[in-house]
Amino acid sequence: MRVISSAELRNNMNKYLDLAASEEIIIQRGSRETFVLQKKEYLEPDEDFNRAISLEKFREGAKEHIRTLFSH
């Protein structure tokens, strides 16, 4: 982990983007603001993700199930 100023980041952007691929970079702006620069990995959708349903579909299915339970 490295701690740098926002000016240092601005002056050496490519350097710190390259470093962020392998380590966390902490950027300090003034005395009250701190940011983290780190590489974000892209996750390929897997089988579970492909079978996922939306929250709205889940809600509708749950409502229907509850209606079925209480209609008997």
Image (cartoon, rainbow, N blue to C red):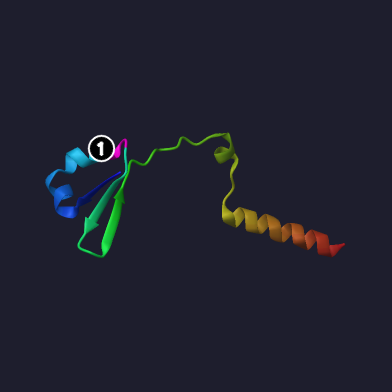
Identity, as a three-letter code, of the amino acid under mark 1: Leu
The N terminus: image quadrant: top left
Q: Residue at x 57, y 51 (%)?
A: 54
43 or 68, nearer to the observer: 43
**Is 57 included in the stretch rendered in magenta?**
no
In the picture, measured across the screen, residue 15 lies left or right of residue 23, that is left
Image location of residue 31, percent across then percent down: 22, 64
Report the magenta stretch's main SS.
helix
Image location of residue 36, percent across then percent down: 31, 51
Chain part drawn in magenta:
18-22
Read off the residue under disc 1. 19
Image location of residue 39, percent across then percent down: 33, 41
Crowdedness of circle 1 by 10 Å Cα count: few (<14), some, many (20+)?
A: some
Q: Secondary structure at mark 1?
A: helix
Quadrant of res 24:
top left
Using the image, determine if residue 25 lies above or below residue 43: below
Using the image, determine if residue 14 lies above or below residue 34: above
Image location of residue 53, percent across then percent down: 59, 47
Q: Residue at x 59, y 57 (%)?
A: 56
Q: Residue pushed farthest left?
A: 11
**Is 19 included in the stretch rendered in magenta?**
yes
